[in-house]
C-alpha cells in the first residue's frame, strides 16, 4: 500500500489544446535518482507501470507515438505530467520532437507506505511457466506462413567414419534375396556351358 497526497491538481479541461486520440498506448518516462536507489519509489514505479501498461508492443511506429506520461521524483515530491508529442520538420530524415502539456497535471507527496517483504513480492511477481515464451532458435516464418529452419553442422572428416557396421548402409532382406538369386543364376549358367576338348575340335 502506498499513500500519495495531492498537493496540486490541474484537469484536462484547464489545458485548452488538442488532446491525443482515445486508446493510444502511452510512453512512460521516469526521472529522478529516487526511482533507482529508494526501495519505496521503486515499488511506486512498479505500480504505475502496472497501472498504465497495456498489451505488449512488439514493434513501434513513430507516427503512433503521441502520448507521453512523465513522472519525476524530487526529494519527497512526485510530479505527474502528461504531454502530447509533436513531430516537427528538422531538415533531415529525423524529425524534431516537441512536447506540449495536455493534462492532467498532478503534484504528489509520498505519505504512508506499507509494502510486502521482498520474498512475498518475488512470489507475487513470479511468472507462470505456461505464460513463458518458449525459445525457438534458428526458426522463422515467411509472409506465407511457411516455417524455415537453419541447421548448423560442423565439418566432418569422412575418412574416419566407420561404414562397415552402419545400419543405413546395410542391405535389406529383399536386396539380399535378389543378390542370392543373381549369384545362383550365374553359377547355374556356368555349369550348363558345354566343355570343349581337343577331340571335339
Image: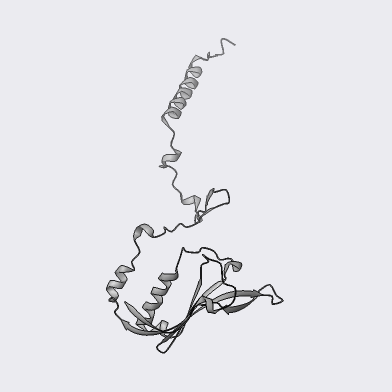
| Image position of 155 with respect to 40: above or below | above
Left or right of 91: which side holds 151?
Answer: left
| Point 48% across, 17% down: residue | 191
Say which of 18 and 187 sits in front: 18
| Image position of 27 with respect to 150: above or below | below
Say which of 120 and 82 sits in front: 82
| Image position of 94 with respect to 107: above or below | above
Say which of 129 and 63 sits in front: 63
| Image position of 69 with respect to 194: above or below | below
Q: Position of residue 70 (x, y in %)?
A: 49, 79
Q: Quadrant of the image for the C terminus?
A: top right
Q: Position of residue 199 (x, y in %)?
A: 56, 10
Quadrant hosting residue 184: top left
Tell me the colour scheme of the image. one colour
| Point 42% across, 42% down: residue | 166
Left or right of 79: which side holds 19?
Answer: right
Q: Position of residue 193 (x, y in %)?
A: 52, 15
Q: Position of residue 118 (x, y in %)?
A: 29, 76
Amino acid at each position: 500500500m502506498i499513500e500519495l497526497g495531492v498537493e496540486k491538481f490541474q484537469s484536462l479541461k484547464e489545458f485548452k489544446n488538442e488532446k491525443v486520440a482515445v486508446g493510444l498506448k502511452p510512453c512512460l518516462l521516469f526521472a529522478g535518482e529516487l526511482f533507482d536507489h529508494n526501495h519505496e519509489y521503486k515499488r511506486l514505479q512498479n505500480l504505475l507501470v502496472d497501472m498504465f501498461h497495456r498489451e505488449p508492443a512488439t514493434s513501434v511506429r513513430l507516427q503512433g507515438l503521441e502520448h507521453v506520461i512523465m513522472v519525476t521524483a524530487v526529494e519527497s515530491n512526485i510530479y505527474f505530467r502528461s504531454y502530447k508529442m509533436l513531430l516537427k520538420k528538422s531538415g533531415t530524415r529525423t524529425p524534431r520532437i516537441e512536447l506540449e502539456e495536455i493534462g492532467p497535471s498532478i503534484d504528489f507527496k509520498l505519505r504512508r507506505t506499507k509494502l510486502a517483504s521482498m520474498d512475498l513480492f518475488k512470489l507475487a511477481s513470479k511468472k507462470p511457466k505456461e505464460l513463458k515464451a518458449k525459445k525457438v532458435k534458428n526458426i522463422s516464418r515467411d509472409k506465407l506462413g511457411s516455417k524455415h529452419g537453419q541447421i548448423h553442422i560442423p565439418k566432418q572428416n569422412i575418412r574416419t567414419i566407420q561404414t562397415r557396421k552402419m545400419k543405413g548402409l546395410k542391405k535389406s532382406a529383399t536386396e539380399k534375396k535378389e543378390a542370392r538369386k543373381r549369384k545362383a543364376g550365374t553359377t547355374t549358367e556356368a555349369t550348363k556351358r558345354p566343355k570343349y576338348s581337343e577331340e571335339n575340335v
